[in-house]
Every structure is written in C-alpha cells, then in structure tokens.
Image (cartoon, rainbow, N blue to C red):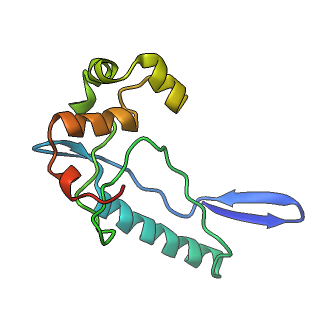
Amino acid sequence: MIGTLADDHLSLAEAHRFANIPVRLPDGLHWDVLRIWSEIKSGLAAAVSKNGKQFDSIGLDTWGVDFALLDQNGGLLGNPFHYRDSRTDGMYAEAFQRVARERIFESTGIQFMEVNTLYQLLAMVVNKSPLLEVAQTF
C-alpha cells in the first residue's frame, strides 16, 4: 500500500498484492520465505514506480506468532514453520505439565492458542530440533 498524507487527509493505494501460500515439506508446513522476500522487493519496486519518487518511510505489519531462527551471523537457519502446522497439536498438555496455566497467562497475558510462539518453541524442544543447538536468536 502507498500512503500519502496531504492537507490532513490520508490516501491509500494498492501497489502490489500477492498470494502468500505456505509450502508442505517432509517435516511440516512452512512459510515460503524466499518467495515472500522476492514479492516484498517487487512490491517496493512497484510502489516506487507508481509513486514516482522515493519514500520517506516504510512500515511493516505482521502477525507475531511465527518466527525464524537465526545463526550467530544473523543467517536464516531454515524456512520458518507456518502457524497452521500440526506440530503444536497437544502442546497445551505438555506446557501445563511444566508450568501452571495461571503462570503462563500471568507471564504472557495472551489467550491460549496452540499457534502461539510458546507452543511452537516447546514443540521444537519436545521434538529435539537440532536447529535449537545452532540458533543464536530468533
């Protein structure tokens, strides 16, 4: 979207749209990060072309349950899992065996949904993901 502010009026125009389709790999459902990155760059180029000038700023909007693991150099360790992947099925019970439900809510303040980052990370721990040994941050 291109946002333009003139005379205290905000105008929005679509610059680029693309389907964001996850990919199924042998270990589960993932985001297609390389395609998404390519589409973001195409969208920025289309926005500059349609706007006729460079932008003053860029804003990003995301839904914050998914994550990417990064190595010590900030390199992506693999395509991030998609929040609809089934690896978090049953992670409530596993989490509540480790930490009381009340304590989890007290610490996070968010509704209980197995797609939440907590349960995604716990699934990686339970499944002994080797990426956790290499990851420095996410």
How far across and down, in percent of the image, does residue 55 sit?
Answer: 65, 76
How far across and down, in percent of the image, does residue 66 sit?
Answer: 38, 44
As drawn, which residue projects farthest toward the bottom?
53
Rendered position, 12 above or below 114: below
How far across and down, in percent of the image, does residue 9 sit?
Answer: 84, 58
Q: Visible in this render: residue 77?
A: yes
As drawn, which residue projects farthest toward the left?
26
Rendered position, 55 above or below 69: below
Residue 71 sits in which quadrant? bottom left
Question: Residue at point 40% right, 34% down?
Answer: 116
Left/right placement of residue 6 relative to residue 88 reads: right
Quadrant of image for the C terminus: bottom left
Query: Between residues 65 and 128, which one lies in front from this camera angle?
Result: 128
Left/right placement of residue 41 relative to residue 94 reads: right
Residue 60 sits in which quadrant? bottom right
Query: Between residues 24 and 64, which one lies in front from this camera angle?
Result: 64
Left/right placement of residue 89 relative to residue 17 reads: left
Quadrant of image for the N terminus: bottom right
Query: Between residues 89 and 46, which one lies in front from this camera angle?
Result: 89
Q: Visible in this render: residue 111?
A: no
Figure disc tally: 0
Residue 133 sits in which quadrant? bottom left
How far across and down, in percent of the image, does residue 15 sit?
Answer: 56, 64
Question: Residue at point 36% right, 68% down?
Answer: 38
Left/right placement of residue 106 relative to residue 31 reads: right
